[in-house]
Image (cartoon, grey):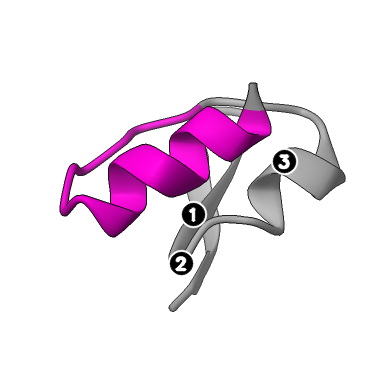
Amino acid sequence: MLELFDVLQAQGMTLVVVTHDDAVGARASRRVRIHAGRLRQEEA
């Protein structure tokens, strides 16, 4: 499934993925961390 995300992103598609899995988040080009409904960290 993660390979599909890579293919879609390479085609220019924007994906919003919500996960608790750090391995999934590590594949993203941008990450936003939210805790208790508040923005905690943004990484580009």
Q: Nearer the viewer, residue 16 or 9?
A: 9
Kind of residue at disc 2:
Ser
Q: Residue 29 at x, y = what percent?
A: 46, 67
Q: Position of residue 37 (x, y in %)?
A: 50, 29
Q: Residue most toward the bottom?
A: 44
Image location (x, y in percent) of residue 43: 51, 74
Q: Are marks 3 and 1 in contact (CB under 8 Å)?
A: no
Instruction: Kindly identify which residue carries mark 3.
Output: 24
**2 with respect to 20 (left or right):** left
Among the 4 quarters of the image, the one containing residue 24: top right
- Decide which of tag 3 and tag 2 comes sooner along the chain: 3
Asked if residue 16 is among those painted magenta in the image, a careful observer would answer yes
> What range is drawn magenta here?
2-17
Q: Residues within 10 Å of mark 3 (few under 14, many from 20)?
A: few
Which quarter of the figure is the C terminus placed in? bottom left
Relative to 42, say whether 16 is above or below.
above
Q: Residues within 10 Å of mark 2 (few under 14, many from 20)?
A: few
Secondary structure at numbered mark 3: helix
**Closer to viewer: mark 3 or mark 1:** 3
Q: Which residue is mark 2?
A: 29
User: Which residue, given by chain and number where applicable, does mark 1 sit on?
Assistant: 32
Q: Report the residue at 48% width, 47% height from top.
A: 6
**Quadrant position of the N terminus in the picture:** top right
The residue that appears at 53% across and 56% down in the rendered structure is 28
Q: Are marks 1 and 2 in contact (CB under 8 Å)?
A: no
* The stretch drawn in magenta includes residue 38: no
Q: CA distance from mark 3 to mark 1?
A: 13 Å
